[in-house]
Amino acid sequence: MTQDTLRSREQRTGWILLIPAMLVLALVFAYPILRAFWLSLFTENLGTNLEPVFSGLRNYQRMALDGRFWQTIANTSIFTVVAITLELVLGMIIALVLNQSFKGRGALRTIAIIPWALPTALIALTWTWIFNDQYGVLNDILLRLGLITTGVNWLGDPTLAMIATIAADVWKTTSFMAILLLAGLQSISEDLYEAHKIDGATPWQSFQQITLPLLMPVILIALLFRFAQSFGVFDLVQVMTAGGPAGATEMVSLYIYATVMRYLDFGYGAALVVVTFLILIAVVAIAFLIRRQLNARTLG
């Protein structure tokens, strides 16, 4: 049996093994998206008409003029960019610490993942209590330290409410980012650092010239995971602020939920889903292009 024949047989076996997984993905992923796209071409609002009426791209034209939609996109973008940036910086610091050899490292690694493992709704309730303007822990600490003279209405001010939701998200998901980065750090050989140290490099230079370049693919994947999760955030914001005050923390997922479940506007809600999905796909495509360039540069 020639090598080409063996390789062809292995490829055929691989495709056969992939077919069940591809069928499952088609059922749970592709079909709902295609169904949402088809539904977005109809006007179907149970509050005004029971039968769907074909309207073409009218829902998308309505979306282009929908100021509330664009405001939710802006809110979601701000939340996502700030949150994942802070999570990347803090997660990198935690990962670098957990990658060192010290007594109790295993226990500390286990403890570090606890915030990520806790239910999001429970975390949101906890942070709502922390940020409460009358009996919250944060205001009590600030009052005792003399930093404020009266309780701050953290969840009642548009800017402070956004900061509060970002802080809660960062506290919960930084550990997830840290674990992903830690896995990448452990794949880097210690011999590289030893050789670099012999050449007179400082720890900061080793971090810049060895750690970051080799860790960049992992960072990109971690950011991609967190972008998808942050851009679709729902439960955390719903419990803490319900999109308030005055829509300052209303994310696109909350707007889609209100459109479909409260206003029963299924056609327009489907159009919102399709556009949000296309935004996510565009970001994923850009990320893969960046990763391909990084791989090409590394091989070159």
Image (tube, helix red, strand yellow):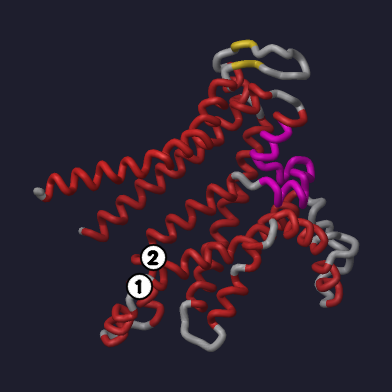
Q: CA distance from mark 1 to mark 2?
A: 8 Å
Q: Nearer the viewer, residue 150 or 56?
A: 56
Do the numbered discs 1 and 2 sit on residues whose CB atoms are within 8 Å?
Answer: yes
Image depth: mark 1 or mark 2 in front: 1
- Residue 2 x %, y %: 9, 48
Dot 1, how many residues are within 10 Å of its Cα: few (below 14), some (14-19), or many (20+)? Answer: some
In which quarter of the view is residue 244 placed?
top right
- Residue 260 x %, y %: 70, 29
Q: Is residue 173 left or right of residue 121?
A: left
- Give the residues drawn in magenta, as a range: 234-259
Identify the residue at image location x=44%, y=55%: 221
Q: Is residue 212 left or right of residue 174?
A: left
Dot 2: element:
helix
User: Count the marks: how many?
Assistant: 2
Identify the residue at image location x=64%, y=44%: 75
Q: Is residue 195 left or right of residue 272?
A: left
Q: Nearer the viewer, residue 139 or 273?
A: 273
Dot 1: element:
loop
Q: Mark 2 sits on what residue?
A: 215
Q: Quadrant of the C terminus?
A: bottom left
The amino acid type of the residue labelled 1 equals Ile
In which quarter of the view is residue 18 placed?
top left
Q: Nearer the viewer, residue 137 or 179?
A: 179
- Residue 146 x %, y %: 84, 75
- Residue 27 x %, y %: 51, 34
The amino acid type of the residue labelled 2 equals Leu
Identify the residue at image location x=19%, y=43%: 8
Q: Is residue 247 magenta?
A: yes
Q: Is residue 24 magenta?
A: no
Numbered circle sitting on residue 188: 1
In which quarter of the view is residue 269 placed?
top right
